C-alpha cells in the first residue's frame, strides 16, 4: 500500500523524471514469466497442501526438496545456494548464514510458516518450482 503522506515529501523532479518513467517501462519477459510462475505454481501447491496437509508440511517438504538429489544442483539450503540469493545474506559469513537458517527455519518453524514458504518459493527459479511440483504434488 502506498503511503501518500510520504509520497508528498518527494520532490516533484524525482517523481517526474525518475518514478513516472519507470512505471511506463516494459519489464523483461523473463521477469514477467517468473512472477506468473510464482503465483500460479504457489496457488496450485497451496491448494493441494491445504486440502490434504498444512503449511508446516509444505515448509518441511520445501526444505527437504532443496536438500534432496533433485534440488541439490538447484536450490540447496544446506549449502546455502538458495539462501544466498536473498540480499540480506550477500557476502555474509557461513556462521551468520548457519545462525539465520537455524533460527528462522528450524527453531521457529511454527512461527509464520506461510511467509517462510513464500520466502523460499520466491527464491526458487521457475524450473525449481516445476521440479518441486513434479516431485511432491504430481507423484
Image: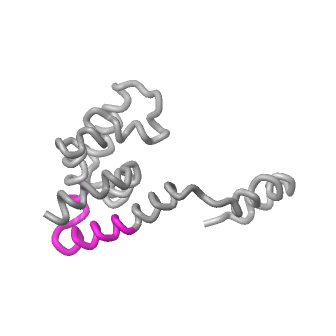
Asked if 77 appears above or below 51 in the picture, the reply is: above
Instruction: Indicate the quadrant where residue 136 lies.
Output: bottom left
Asked if 94 appears above or below 80 in the picture, the reply is: above
Is residue 95 a member of the stretch shown in magenta? no
Is residue 56 a member of the stretch shown in magenta? yes
Asked if 112 appears above or below 43 in the picture, the reply is: above
Q: Which stretch appears magenta? A: 40-59
The answer to whether 37 appears left or right of 53 in the picture is right
| Image quarter of the N terminus | bottom right
x, y percent for residue 58 = 23, 59
Q: Which residue does the image show at 32% across and 56% down from the upper left?
A: 117
Of all residues shown, which one is farthest toward the left?
A: 139
The answer to whether 51 appears left or right of 32 in the picture is left
x, y percent for residue 67 = 21, 41
Q: Which residue does the image show at 76% across and 60% down from the upper left?
A: 20
x, y percent for residue 98 = 31, 31
| Image quarter of the C terminus | bottom left
Amino acid at each position: 500500500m502506498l503511503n501518500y503522506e510520504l509520497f508528498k515529501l518527494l520532490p516533484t523532479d524525482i517523481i517526474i523524471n525518475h518514478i513516472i518513467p519507470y512505471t511506463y517501462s516494459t519489464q523483461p519477459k523473463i521477469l514477467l514469466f517468473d512472477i506468473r510462475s510464482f503465483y500460479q505454481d504457489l496457488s496450485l501447491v497451496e491448494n493441494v497442501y491445504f486440502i490434504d496437509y498444512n503449511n508446516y508440511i509444505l515448509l518441511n517438504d520445501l526444505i527437504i526438496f532443496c536438500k534432496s538429489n533433485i534440488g541439490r544442483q538447484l536450490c540447496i539450503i544446506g549449502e546455502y545456494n538458495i539462501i544466498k540469493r536473498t540480499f540480506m545474506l550477500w557476502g555474509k559469513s557461513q556462521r551468520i548464514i548457519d545462525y539465520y537458517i537455524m533460527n528462522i527455519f528450524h527453531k521457529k518453524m511454527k512461527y509464520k510458516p506461510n511467509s517462510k514458504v513464500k520466502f523460499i518459493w520466491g527464491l526458487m527459479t521457475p524450473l525449481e518450482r516445476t521440479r518441486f511440483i513434479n516431485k511432491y504434488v504430481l507423484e
